[in-house]
Image: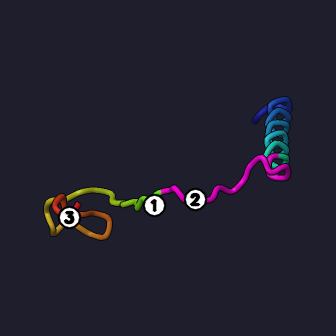
Amino acid sequence: MKSNKTVKIIIFVALFLSAVILISVMTGAVKETTADTDSVKLPVIMYHSLLKDEKLQNDYTVSPTLF
């Protein structure tokens, strides 16, 4: 079991970080970013692997020729 001092330190750190996050959000230090007019949209292709054998391909794999 953790000592009383360790528990107090963990609680203090958790409260301190919560306060920092709360203050940052309330003061506007953390703002939502929006896309600039000069930005470029980049599609993200998410496949887990490339397989030559078409019998083993599924929704999460593609063939090297398709890629």
Binning the other alpha carbons within 10 Å of mark 3 as few (below 14), some (14 to 19) or many (20 upward) gives few
Measured in 3D between alpha carbons, the distance from the residue under mark 3 to the one under mark 1, in whole angstroms, is: 22 Å
* Residue 27 among those drawn in magenta: yes
Report the span colored magenta. 24-39
Horizontal side of 57 relative to 43 (left or right) equals left
Question: Is most of the magenta stretch helix, strand or loop?
Answer: loop
Badge 3 is on which residue?
A: 66
Q: Position of residue 12 (x, y in %)?
A: 85, 37
Callout 1–callout 2 Cβ contact below 8 Å: yes
Mark 3 or mark 1, earlier in chain:
1
Nearer-the-camera pick, 15 or 25: 25
Q: Position of residue 54 (x, y in %)?
A: 15, 67
Binning the other alpha carbons within 10 Å of mark 2 as few (below 14), some (14 to 19) or many (20 upward) gives few
Badge 1 is on which residue?
A: 41
Image quadrant where residue 19 sits: top right
Horizontal side of 3 relative to 37 (left or right) equals right
User: For the C terminus, which image quadrant?
Assistant: bottom left
Q: Position of residue 41 (x, y in %)?
A: 45, 60
Q: Is residue 51 above or below residue 5?
A: below
Furthest residue to the left? 53
Report the residue at 31% width, 70% height from top: 59
| Amino acid type assigned to the residue bearing label 1 in the image | Lys
Badge 2 is on which residue?
A: 35
Mark 2 or mark 3, earlier in chain:
2
